[in-house]
């Protein structure tokens, strides 16, 4: 009986590892990520000048750190940013439009943090800033070491991921 349980557990771990490896190998490594319009016309909806950011070393003692990702609407149509979510409770995101209006905060759903839909429209040629705010002390003393977090946006019904990493020091 114990041998059967062990085989099932090993199989589940191996399957999970394959799924994780497959997901990571399909991530874009470029510094620019484009989204194709849902109509398949090939016109770009939003372009991020960068989708990956490295804070380097950050100190728990020094408090919050933030980075701004710039997204531009390169299409000839207005684009809606719907849901905005973060991958961890230690991260919140805000959207800042060209007129200076900030929407948010948006956080990790299901953990009591701020989550929801931005319902923001980005007109053709306009830019929107996604401000990522990371709290290196959110996980307490056990939270030191390398971290990777994501902000997921629903753009025109399609997902867009913005990533950052850091090495948390006491």
Image (cartoon, rainbow, N blue to C red):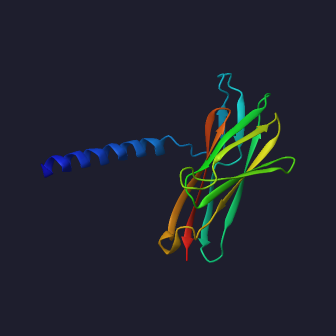
Q: Is residue 157 visible?
A: yes
Q: How many marks?
A: 0
For residue 126, which quarter of the picture? Answer: top right
Q: Is residue 139 above or below residue 1?
A: below
Of residue 86 and residue 37, the one placed in the foreground of this image is 86
Left or right of residue 128: residue 142: left
Q: Residue furthest left?
A: 1
* x then y, percent, for residue 135: 62, 66
Residue at horizontal 68 percent and vertical 39 percent from the top: 82
Taking depth in this image into account, of 6 and 27 the one nearest to the observer is 6
* Residue that appears at 77% across and 45% down: 128
Instruction: Tell me where residue 116 appears, x and y as whole percent.
Output: 65, 45
Which quarter of the rendered picture does the C terminus lie within? bottom right
Where is residue 18 shown, x and y percent of the image? Answer: 36, 43
Residue shown at 58% from the left, 71% from the top: 137
Nearest to the observer: residue 165 or residue 11: 11
Position of residue 21 relative to residue 43, above or below, is below
Q: Residue furthest right?
A: 99
Is residue 31 at all visible to an observer of this figure? no
- Above or below, 39 relative to 159: above
Q: Which residue is at a point 78% across and 38% down the rendered structure image?
A: 122
């Amino acid at each position: 009986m114990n041998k059967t349980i062990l085989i099932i557990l090993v199989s589940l771990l191996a399957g999970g590892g394959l799924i994780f490896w497959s997901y990571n190998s399909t991530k874009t490594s470029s510094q620019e990520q484009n989204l194709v319009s849902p109509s398949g016309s090939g016109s770009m909806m939003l372009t991020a000048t960068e989708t990956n950011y490295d804070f380097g070393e950050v100190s728990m003692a020094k408090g919050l750190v933030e980075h701004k990702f710039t997204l531009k609407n390169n299409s000839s149509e207005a684009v809606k940013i719907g849901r905005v979510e973060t991958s961890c409770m230690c991260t919140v995101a805000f959207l800042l439009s060209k007129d200076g209006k900030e929407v948010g905060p948006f956080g990790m759903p299901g953990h009591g943090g701020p989550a929801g839909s931005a319902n923001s429209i980005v007109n053709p040629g306009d830019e929107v800033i996604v401000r990522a705010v990371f709290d290196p002390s959110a996980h307490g003393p056990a939270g030191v070491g390398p971290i990777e977090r994501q902000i997921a946006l629903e753009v025109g019904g399609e997902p867009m991921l913005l990533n950052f990493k850091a090495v948390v020091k006491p």
